[in-house]
Image (cartoon, rainbow, N blue to C red):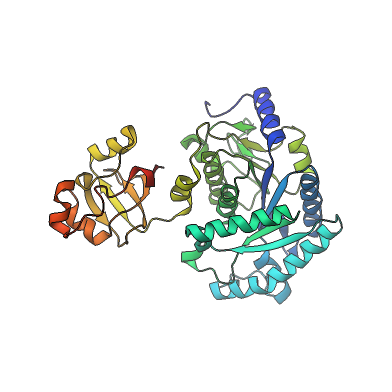
Amino acid sequence: MTFQVPLDKGIDLRKSFLHAAKRVVVKVGSAVLTTGTGLNFNVLENLAKELTFLHETGREVILVSSGAVASGRKKLGLGSRVLRMREKQAAAAVGQSSLMRCYEDLFERFSQKVAQVLLTHDDLSHRDRYLNVRNTMSTLFEWGILPIVNENDTVSVKELRFGDNDTLGAMVTNLIDADVFICLTDVDGLYTGNPCTNPEALRVHTIAEVTDEVENMAGNICGSSLGTGGMQSKIRAAKMVAARGGCSFIGPGREPEVLQSLFAGEAVGTFFLPKTHKLASRKHWIAYTLRPKGFLVLDEGACRALREKGKSLLPSGIREVRGHFGVGDPIHCLDGEGRAFAAGLVNYDSGDIEKIHGRHTSEIEDILGYKDSDEVVHRDNLVML
């Protein structure tokens, strides 16, 4: 398995990266934070203790926390029935204050001040708001405050949602240029097979690169409420962080002092190494934060020019336009088999690209009556996925 780093070398790499880490994002999901009746206060107390420990080592720490809906469900006596969207939003409104009060009380025991930051995907998909959030985080760090981030479930609708808090955690990690993204869950790592059915299944301690083989290992879990989709989102989050040059960790959130064990260099959980060549901040934002508003299907020559030669996208290489989008909107480029391989920001809207696709740049002005650019997507606004 080429993606797996030998244990001894992996431990040395962990120690090296973690020792140098100055900013850390810790994400904890509902599977860890809650029980069948509400919040798990023992886990929350241990979490406050561990994050304070990290903060006292001189690191800047952010907590990405689930639990608002579960807390509200308990407070309102809603039981275990499936909630409609508006009921989830209302439960989150009730539960968020309880969750934060709990965190404030627990962190106060360790003399650590905390702040609440509620986000929607829309806050990070607009560059100016993205930078404003970043500036707020930096100020909180300067004041010695530990930010606690959650999705703003009360106002989030499908179009504004991150999809899951793993994605939110990875985006926050890249937003603040954190060195490590730690995902605490109810499994002790990623396995080569399902340990419940395969006695030869082994935990993978260190992963060099998130390949297709690694993503296919998402189903190798047992005794967890995660399911395959939950682990897939964690692996995708690790891939997002690696592309920006950060490390990730998936490990047992209910294990006492797991973070101290991790930073002491012990072989707990599964550790993901960063990519050697990291994406610039703006290109990472285009590739991993923005959602495409349309798609451009390219011919073989254009695919090759983008992939192998780092060229801009010209109208002549576009075979088909899908969706409705405006100037500056994010799109994905598809190859002949319909696979998205590049993301970018367009210089023309979908209606104009419909008129000029398959034509040479010299024809743009005659067709449209104007020409703002030779390129449909300039290479400075284009990134390979």
User: From the viewer's perspective, is residue 36 above or below residue 283?
Assistant: below
Residue 171 pos. (x, y %): 55, 51
User: From the viewer's perspective, is residue 277 above or below residue 229?
Assistant: above
Residue 162 shows in this picture: no
Left or right relative to 185: residue 264: right
Residue sitting at 33 percent across and 57 percent down? 294
Residue 220 shows in this picture: yes
User: From the viewer's perspective, is residue 238 above or below residue 95?
Assistant: above
Residue 12 pos. (x, y %): 69, 26
* Between 157 and 33, the one nearer to me in the picture: 157
Q: Quadrant of residue 302?
A: top left
- Which image quadrant: the C terminus? top left
Left or right relative to 218: residue 75: right
Residue 304 pos. (x, y %): 28, 35
Residue sitting at 32 percent across and 46 percent down? 378
Left or right relative to 326: residue 240: right
Residue sitting at 59 percent across and 45 percent down? 177
* Between 173 and 84, the one nearer to me in the picture: 173
The count of marks equals: 0
Residue 15 pos. (x, y %): 71, 30
Q: Residue furthest right?
A: 109
Left or right relative to 86: residue 96: right
Q: Quadrant of residue 31?
A: bottom right
